[in-house]
Image (cartoon, helix red, strand yellow):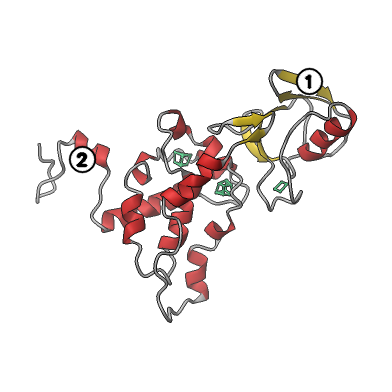
Amino acid sequence: MKIKVQRKTLAEYEVDLIDATLLEGLGEIKTTQDNTLTYSSGCRSSVCGSCSMRVNGREVLACSYKVQDADVIEPLKNVPVIRDLVVDMDKAYSFNAKAKAWQTLLSDGADVSHEDEKINEIQSDCILCGSCYSACPVYSVNEEFLGPFALTRVWRYVSDKRESDSSEKIATIQVNGVWDCTLCNECTLVCPQNISSKMDIEKLRSKSAMAGYSDPSFANNFGGGFGFDGSPSF
Ligand code: SF4
Ligand code: SF4
Ligand code: FES
């Protein structure tokens, strides 16, 4: 089969493999045709998140995607390319810290049941592959958007029964955060861990509303909010 890989230009390679993963295909090119081809990988078993890239415009893990004839392989979007398929995730990862995506105050003696654990179990499975970040359309208009995986991580801690003060986190995600998401669901569609950042963001919006925050663009459109009878005030 023939595949194309985005390097300085779009380079075409013949890959003589059947039922192979994309990572195996890239390995074959590197070892037999061009050892300068550069990509990231680690676990080879969909655990470490380092081999995320795009195939025909869609984010995949190269170690789990079965490579097909005529595939076009590109690096992740919304992040600087270091070389070939290797990208610089530093800024993307820095949004975890900006969003304060950690436990703030551990309450003593919180009784955590199996049901409680299920509330944020799947969010804890994020492997930081960056696929959702690459697929998110918001970055074309706002490079400071906290983004899907950081907001998922905020939900993971906000919803944790052992967290006794989530107010700072909720305050932090009001700017370049939950209200900037378009709820397009692209992040959910590409997540290899079946995490829906879109749903997590919707839950964070509800938490924000309960804490007295509202969508600033909505408030601006109506000149500052609603009257006591629910009608817009201008
Ligand atoms: S749902 Fe929100 S976070 Fe997810 S890709 Fe769309 S805009 Fe980005
Ligand atoms: S939420 Fe999913 S797509 Fe996004 S970084 Fe985590 S594992 Fe990857
Ligand atoms: S090599 Fe670790 S997820 Fe693909």
Instruction: Inspect the image, locate mark 2, and give the three-letter code of the amino acid beneath it.
Output: Ala
Classify mark 1: helix, strand or loop.
strand
Q: Is residue 97 left or right of residue 217?
A: right
Classify mark 2: helix, strand or loop.
helix
Q: Residues within 10 Å of mark 1 (few under 14, many from 20)?
A: some
Q: CA distance from mark 2 to mark 1?
A: 51 Å
The label nearer to you, 2 versus 1, is 1
- Could you tell me if residue 152 is visible in this image? yes
Instruction: Inspect the image, locate mark 1, and give the three-letter code of the amino acid beneath it.
Output: Glu
Q: Is residue 62 above or below residue 71?
A: below
Looking at the rendering, in which quadrant would you find the C terminus?
A: top left
Label placed on residue 219 = 2
User: For mark 1, what is the residue?
Assistant: 12
Q: Is residue 98 left or right of residue 67?
A: left
Task: Give whichever of 195, 138 is nearer the camera.
Answer: 138
Q: Position of residue 233 (x, y in %)?
A: 10, 40
Toward which corner of the image does residue 70 lie, by quadrant?
top right
Q: Position of residue 121 (x, y in %)?
A: 54, 63
Q: Is residue 140 above or below residue 231?
A: above
Q: Position of residue 153 (x, y in %)?
A: 48, 55
Kindly check if marks 2 and 1 are in contact, taking CB atoms under 8 A apart as contact: no
Residue at 61 percent of width and 45 percent of height = 129
Residue at 25 percent of width and 51 percent of height = 213
Toward which corner of the image does residue 64 lie, by quadrant?
top right
